[in-house]
Image (cartoon, helix red, strand yellow):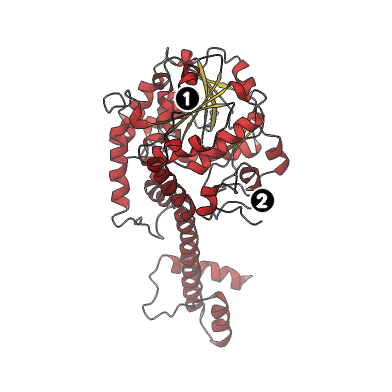
Amino acid sequence: MRLVRDLYVMLDKVNSEEAPLDLKVPETFDEFIWDMKNNDYDLRSFAFKLKATMESMDKELRSSRLSEQLNKHYAAIAIPKGLYCLSLRLTDEYSSNALARKQLPPPELVPCLSDNSYFHFVLASDNILAASVVVRSTIRSSLKPERIVFHVITDKKTYPAMHSWFALNSLSPAIVEVKGVHQFDWLTQENVPVLESIETQRAARDRYHGSRRPITSANDSPRVFAAKLQAGSPTYTNVLNHIRIYMPELFPSLNKVVFLDDDVVVQHDLSPLWDIDLSGKVNGAVETCRGGDSWVMSKRFRNYLNFSHPLIAKNFDPSECAWAYGMNIFDLNAWRKTTIKDKYHHWVKENLKSNFTLWRLGTLPPGLIAFKGHVHPIDPSWHLLGLGYQEKTDISSVEQAAVIHYNGQSKPWLEIGFKHLQPFWTKYVNYSNEFLRNCHIMEPQL
């Protein structure tokens, strides 16, 4: 007992001292044990050796974890060759094939785009394959596909390819519209201050990515390291990431829409969403604070915001229920009576002024703040989250959910996707499609 006590005293002592310059640090713990067995060290030398070995091992472990995080980050943001090929081939098809350029929807169905007797879905994406799965799964799961109208929004670069895909792959009797952000006259920098934010975010990315590689260090805290990685993700410098905040302006004739992210799969009929009484609220969403996996999501949300910043601490309570993006029913009439958009712009600007110290790049934090007091909780069975980061997601819960959401890095179209969760997504991909086969996009082998 005395020896142990003396060792603790010595460890406390050497902890505040510099190690001898000639101290040789064992590279592994086995080497440390061998060294101790074969050399007669005094207590002080032993304590220095032990301290140096543990610090070395801790540094190596931290470096290994950060390397793993970095590699997964690049795997998550990289565009797979197959998807890149698909976009190029469909763009070429748009320029050479009149059928790929045909009007969507045909002229006789254009009035349906503003007809509130239809179920209107909005999807913003630059990923053609992911968008096709969202649209196809929604229509195939619907009990009334003839009453579905899909408004697919994409960026200017992807527009020809996205249009080609839906022009050449009819989903009748449902109606599909494809529109590029450049085709919305309202989306100007004067009306959309986040366009300035996007440019500033790109500057932030360039600051971290001088050579397109984030300047990260093993000494970074997990929060700083994650922020640097996130700054390099093109997702956060894309106007499509902010588009949902402009639903009332982009669709002035519509009363209600369901907004879907491009990493979801719809498994059940969603038409009952239009019958939900939102009690005057704007946003019908699943809350993420009911325990279990939802508690994990809420915990992840707390990591998004910097609650040590006085502005965040004053305006948001970390114990409050958060809610999920990905599948939301929006009452656009109720929305038009609010200042949600202005509040969103205000907080995006505040984050810019604070040099991104209020939250990491992204739209969830300002969305949570802007919609505060305007959210109506809906039953959790409508929307199951976490399939892109929770490998041990309960399969029975996945099977029962109306919408499953692959939020997280492990998207089902990527190599790092969780193999046992991919079939729920791949079942809606037509791997016999000529364009997919020519781009070698094949069904993953389990």
Image point (41%, 60%), residue name? 218
- Image coordinates of residue 27 in percent, x first then y, are 49, 77
- Looking at the image, is mark 2 or mark 1 earlier in the sequence? 1
Mark 2 vs mark 1: in front: 1
Task: Please tell me the numbered disc located at residue 349.
Answer: none
Question: Could you say whether the residue bearing mark 2 is in a helix, strand or loop?
Answer: loop
Image point (49%, 53%), residue name? 82
Q: Is residue 341 above or below residue 354?
A: above
Q: Residues within 10 Å of mark 2 (few under 14, many from 20)?
A: few
Frontmost residue, 403 versus 252: 252
- Image coordinates of residue 370 in percent, x first then y, are 42, 24
Q: Amino acid at mark 1?
A: Pro
Residue picked out by circle 1 = 106
- Image coordinates of residue 373 in percent, x first then y, are 49, 19
The quadrant in which residue 164 appears is: top left
Q: Residue 360: in sight, yes or no?
A: no
Q: Amino acid at mark 2?
A: His
Name the residue furthest right.
396
Q: Is residue 174 above or below residue 304?
A: above
The quadrant in which residue 30 appears is: bottom right
Q: Is residue 329 above or below residue 125?
A: above
Q: Residue 175: in sight, yes or no?
A: yes
Identify the image quadrant of the N terminus.
bottom right
- Image coordinates of residue 234 in percent, x first then y, are 38, 45
Q: Residues within 10 Å of mark 1 (few under 14, many from 20)?
A: few
Residue picked out by circle 2 = 420
Frontmost residue, 242 versus 39: 242
Identify the image quadrant of the C terminus.
bottom right
Disc count in the image? 2
Label 2 – label 1 distance at C-alpha: 40 Å
